[in-house]
Image (tube, grey):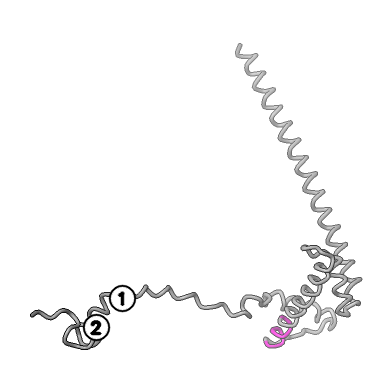
């Protein structure tokens, strides 16, 4: 009498059982591709060092007059990190003010109210004047570019009219 697989031995044991188990179980799925390494948070949110250095040196040279001021690398990093934290805190506070007003877009007034709420009142007036200066500069740029575009369009129009006139004269002369 021929033995069937699994007969004469305990079910699930021995080499035949392991072969059956291997055949019955599906092959394991290929491992997913490894995820890219996470970008450290400091690298993502760090302010550009060149800008931080320029801002710090400009302000310190203003205060020191003619004296040359040096700032070491760790101090620049501390300035940048402080600015980043301040921006996060101010933006979170402005966002809360915006949400209280049932809006989704933060506007200038939200930022000014946030400065007041976090007790940086001394920044409000300098910020208002800086915003006003910025708006004036942009208005001048926009009006300058609009008038320049208008002037170019007029030149193009007169240039094309001159060409058309010359072409008509050529037609009359040849005809």
Q: Depth check: 83 or 141 in front?
A: 83
Residue drawn at the location 89% of the way across and 71% of the way down = 126
Please provide percent x and percent y for residue 57.
Answer: 76, 79
Q: Depth check: 83 or 40 in front?
A: 40
Relative height, residue 138 to residue 60 (above, below): above
Q: How crowded is mark 1: few (under 14 residues within 10 Å), some or many (20 or more)?
A: few
Relative height, residue 52 to residue 129 (above, below): below
**What kind of secondary structure does the magenta stretch mostly adopt?**
helix
Please provide percent x and percent y for residue 7.
Answer: 17, 83
Question: What is the secondary structure assignment of the residue under circle 2?
Answer: helix
Q: Quadrant of the C terminus?
A: top right
Using the rendered view, name the quadrant where residue 130 is placed: bottom right
Q: Are marks 1 and 2 in contact (CB under 8 Å)?
A: no
Using the rendered view, name the quadrant where residue 148 is placed: top right
The residue carrying mark 1 is 25
Residue drawn at the location 62% of the way across and 79% of the way down = 41
Q: Depth check: 18 or 62 in front?
A: 18
The residue carrying mark 2 is 18
Q: What stretch is highlighted in magenta?
A: 74-80
Q: Is residue 78 magenta?
A: yes
Residue drawn at the location 84% of the way across and 65% of the way down = 101
Total marks shown come to 2
Question: What is the secondary structure assignment of the residue under circle 1?
Answer: loop
Using the rendered view, name the quadrant where residue 149 is placed: top right
Residue drawn at the location 72% of the way across and 32% of the way down = 157
What whole-number distance in Å separates the C-alpha atoms at marks 1 and 2? 11 Å
Please provide percent x and percent y for residue 128.
Answer: 89, 67
Left or right: 116 in relation to 169: right
Q: Residue 128 carries which label?
A: none
Q: Does the magenta stretch include residue 140?
A: no
């Amino acid at each position: 009498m021929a033995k069937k697989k699994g007969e004469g031995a305990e079910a699930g044991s021995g080499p035949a059982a392991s072969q059956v188990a291997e055949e019955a179980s599906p092959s394991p799925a290929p491992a997913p591709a490894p995820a890219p390494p996470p970008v450290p948070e400091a690298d993502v949110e760090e302010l550009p060092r060149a800008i931080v250095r320029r801002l710090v040196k400009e302000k310190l040279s203003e205060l020191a007059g003619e004296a040359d001021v040096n700032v070491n690398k760790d101090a620049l990093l501390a300035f940048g990190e402080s600015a980043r934290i301040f921006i996060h805190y101010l933006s979170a506070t402005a966002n809360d003010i915006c949400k209280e007003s049932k809006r989704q877009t933060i506007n200038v007034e939200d930022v000014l109210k946030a400065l007041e709420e976090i007790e940086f009142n001394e920044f409000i007036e300098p910020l208002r004047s800086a915003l006003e200066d910025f708006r004036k500069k942009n208005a001048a740029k926009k009006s300058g570019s609009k008038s320049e575009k208008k002037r170019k369009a007029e030149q193009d129009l007169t240039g094309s009219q001159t060409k058309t006139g010359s072409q008509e004269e050529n037609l009359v002369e040849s005809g």
